[in-house]
Image: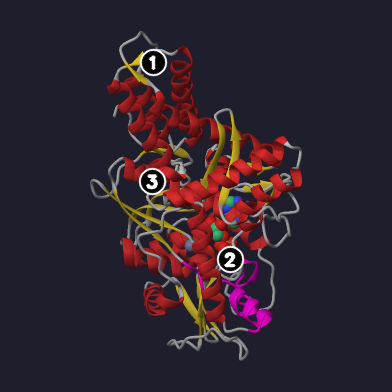
Amino acid sequence: MNSKLLIYNSLSNKKEEFKPLHPKLVGMYVCGPTVYNRVHLGNCRTFISFDLMVRWLRYLEYKVRYVRNITDAGHLEFDADHGEDRISKRARLEQIEPMEVVQKYTLDFHQCLAKFNVLPPSIEPTASGHIIEQIQLIKSIIEKGYAYEKNGSVYFDVLKYHKSHQYGVLSNRDIEELAHNSRDLEGQADKKNPQDFALWKKAEPLHIMRWPSPWSDGFPGWHLECTAMSTKYLGEVFDIHGGGMDLKFPHHECEIAQGVAVNGKSPVKYWIHGNLLTLNGKKMAKSTGSFLLPDEIFDGTSKLLKKPYSPNVVRFFMLQAHYRSVLDISEAALEASEKGLDRLIYGYQMLDQLQNGSDEYEFDFDQWLNQSQTVMNDDFNSPLLISQCFTAVKFIQKIKSSGKKIPPEMIKNLKKHLGLFLVDVLGLTIDEPNNSKTNTQLQDSLIKILIDLRNEARQNGDYSISDKIRNELFQIGVEIRDTNLGTKYYIQ
Ligand code: AMP
Ligand code: ZN
């Protein structure tokens, strides 16, 4: 490989050559979801972006320890230091136990990401499972003199920290401005300065999610869990920390301050922030009601879209944008992605139909491979990798339609490397079910009978029957697509 991996580091605001702390090993931490609600498509974009990065690092033969946490304690409404715990509130509304809320939405999160073919992390720690580590961390921060206790709660002393270190290095916030922007609300009175943030909060009598500590029965501050869990599983300093843009401040800024306060060194070498998914130009978010749920897109029940789209298509749509660009979702964009993905898949499958021989052709495989690796090494540029895949597919189609022959070595190389890019790196599903080990020939034959019946119904103008067959197959996870090569089906 001729190129080196460059990563855009949000700390320096520039691309830097990636040099892991330990050769061939990468420690990576990504802030996971707060499991109080079903994940929306915006959340999924962030996890798909980091999935792409893990896949690329593994392609580069790094051994990646990928830690992605579950926030199941300490995250209050509005990301604030006061107010109701998001999980407790949901438990109250659904009249179930907080841990039932956690279980229900963790399961939903896992199922959703599995549909998108997002690989599971190496470790998925929970905040509630690391209360002891968080209490220990608070004790250390107090010992170092950067935290104080007041009325059973403990706060990080931002101004004191700022005297010897710089608070705001990641988000470039001005400490004075922060004071103006911090409103003096209920629950803030115990703080020495409005910029301070909670490390431990004393629980109000009705607050259910509480743990004993040296200061009070209470719960940890939201920013603390990620410092406790990343340190435990990746060390005081590790390679990569990621999350969505919106976590830069205050969450990640506070993580840096906590790490520096305890260990005297900045905890993360490369900070990576994924950009937002928007809907009609507005950030997709539960709080504003402007969001799409993945399952509504897959089963076609979303009121915002005319037809269903498979997880494979939605994943492809996401990867057609660079992770640092804002991405706006629309019906037209999804339709274009669906068509594009079909072209790629059929092009790839057409490789099996090419004839071995040694006719003249214009395609420099080594240069193509090198260029594909170079674009991904340039800060994980998936849209350019996809465009490289299209270049290969155009070549395959040209050879097929001209009836030319190419050497078996070339077919083998294209099959291997295009397959690696589409399946291993981009995480797309490209196998026809009859090639898949999980599907029996009987199932294949039955689906083909249904497809024939549907096509007959269409020819006879009986669209209610043909649509019914297509939609009902889709409901059970079988997607039918009409292509230039006939009707194909995919099992999601
Ligand atoms: P939360 O459960 O709210 O902490 O969010 C989980 C992850 O999803 C975080 O990394 C957020 O930054 C990310 N996220 C939330 N909304 C969006 C969005 N509209 N687009 C992309 N990522 C998002
Ligand atoms: Zn976090």
Q: Position of residue 428 (x, y in %)?
A: 47, 43
Depth check, mark 1 against mark 2: the one in front is: 1
Q: Mark 1 falls on what kind of element? A: loop
Q: Which residues are magenta?
A: 70-95
Depth check, mark 3 against mark 1: the one in front is: 1
| Mark 1 CB lies closer than 8 A to ligand 1 | no
Q: Position of residue 67 (x, y in %)?
A: 38, 60
- State left or right for residue 263 relative to residue 325: left
Q: Nearer the viewer, residue 391 or 459?
A: 459
Dot 1, crowdedness within 10 Å: few (<14), some or many (≥20)?
few
Whether residue 82 is in magenta: the answer is yes
Dot 3, crowdedness within 10 Å: few (<14), some or many (≥20)?
many
Q: Earlier in the sequence, mark 2 or mark 3?
A: 3
Q: Earlier in the sequence, mark 3 or mark 1?
A: 3
Residue type at tag 3: Arg
User: Do residues under tags 3 and 1 come within 8 Å of each other at their CB atoms?
Assistant: no
Badge number at residue 195:
2
Residue type at tag 2: Gln
Q: Mark 2 falls on what kind of element? A: loop
User: Do residues under tags 1 and 2 come within 8 Å of each other at their CB atoms?
Assistant: no
For mark 1, what is the residue? 363
Residue at coordinates 56% horizontally, 45% vertically from top-left?
Answer: 449
Q: Mark 3 falls on what kind of element? A: helix
Dot 2, crowdedness within 10 Å: few (<14), some or many (≥20)?
many
- State left or right for residue 283 relative to residue 461: left
Residue at coordinates 23% horizontally, 46% vertically from top-left?
Answer: 23
Q: Position of residue 359 (x, y in %)?
A: 34, 9
How many numbered badges does the structure rendering display?
3
Residue at coordinates 48% horizontally, 47% vertically from top-left?
Answer: 444
